[in-house]
Image (tube, rainbow, N blue to C red):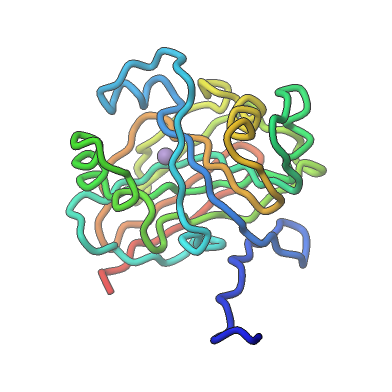
């Protein structure tokens, strides 16, 4: 048997200081993982179990750069996030061993068609149209734990056209990276190449074509994204 056509190659994310790239398998995203952002979305930030949505692996835009304003929305929002890249996985991973699965960390943007997300949320429908669209996950290079260590604190910020829009600290994550990995592994078998977007701090807002976004996380450099007109 032969394949009818060549499959699309895996999305490959640059690794800082290396000529290797990390092939993406799945993209898991945590919803409302900073209390101040939960409040701005009109929700109670009490520590309920985390919830997740997913993006397709080919929604990742390796290295960031230019993305197009997506169709079907009048309210495209930025969400700056710490992203975890796994080099091993498994199921029912204890919190104490979860950090061993982490290959490295990167800066990511969970771009969101907010109008569609809110509409689906209010109707009890899936979030895919709001979250899982083409070019919705610009991602900076992955910094290996071997060079930057585990990330449990440090500033996370986003500027749009030089103006600070989002600001938080990784120490304010409601669910820590090890807790998030352990929780997910109770429901999915995690594998090398899985990414986890860990949630965004307060300050999400709309962008338009021409806007220049710069995300920063202490120790992980910066991610630059420019919004192009729609295709
Ligand atoms: Mn998000």
**Residue 111's spot in the image, x, y percent?**
37, 50
Please name whichever residue, 29 or 165, is drawn nearer the observer in this view of the structure: 29
- The quadrant of the picture showing ligand 1 is top left
* Residue pictured at 24% horizontal, 35% vertical: 124
Work out whether 198 lies above or below 211. Answer: above
Work out whether 21 lies above or below 95. Answer: below
Please name whichever residue, 76 or 59, is drawn nearer the observer in this view of the structure: 59
Please name whichever residue, 116 or 19, is drawn nearer the observer in this view of the structure: 116
* Residue pictured at 56% horizontal, 62% vertical: 62
Outermost residue on the top side: it is: 46
**Picture quarter with the C terminus:** bottom left
**Residue 56's spot in the image, x, y percent?**
47, 57
* Residue pictured at 26% horizontal, 69% vertical: 229
**Residue 28's spot in the image, x, y percent?**
52, 44
Left/right placement of residue 125 relative to residue 217 reads left
**Residue 125's spot in the image, x, y percent?**
26, 41
**Picture quarter with the N terminus:** bottom right
* Residue pictured at 55% horizontal, 31% vertical: 155
């Amino acid at each position: 048997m032969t394949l009818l056509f060549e499959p699309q190659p895996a999305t490959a994310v640059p690794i800082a200081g290396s000529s290797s790239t990390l092939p993406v398998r799945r993209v898991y995203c945590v919803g409302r993982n900073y209390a101040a952002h939960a409040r701005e979305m009109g929700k109670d930030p009490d520590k309920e179990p985390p919830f997740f949505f997913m993006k397709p692996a080919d929604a990742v835009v390796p290295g960031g750069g230019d993305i197009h304003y997506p169709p079907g929305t009048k309210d495209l929002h930025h969400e700056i996030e710490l992203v975890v890249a796994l080099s091993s996985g498994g199921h029912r991973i204890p919190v104490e061993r979860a950090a061993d699965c982490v290959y490295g960390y990167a800066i990511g943007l969970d771009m969101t068609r907010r109008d569609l997300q809110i509409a689906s949320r209010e109707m009890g429908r899936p979030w895919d149209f709001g979250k899982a669209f083409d070019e919705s996950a610009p991602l900076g290079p992955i910094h290996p734990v071997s060079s930057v260590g585990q990330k449990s604190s440090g500033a996370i910020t986003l500027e749009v056209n030089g103006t600070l829009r989002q600001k938080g600290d990784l120490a304010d994550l409601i669910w820590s990276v090890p807790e998030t990995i352990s929780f997910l592994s109770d429901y999915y078998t995690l594998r090398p190449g899985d990414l986890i977007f860990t949630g965004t701090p307060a300050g999400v807002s709309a962008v338009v074509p021409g806007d220049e976004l710069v995300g920063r996380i202490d120790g992980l450099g910066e991610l630059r994204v420019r919004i192009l007109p729609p295709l």
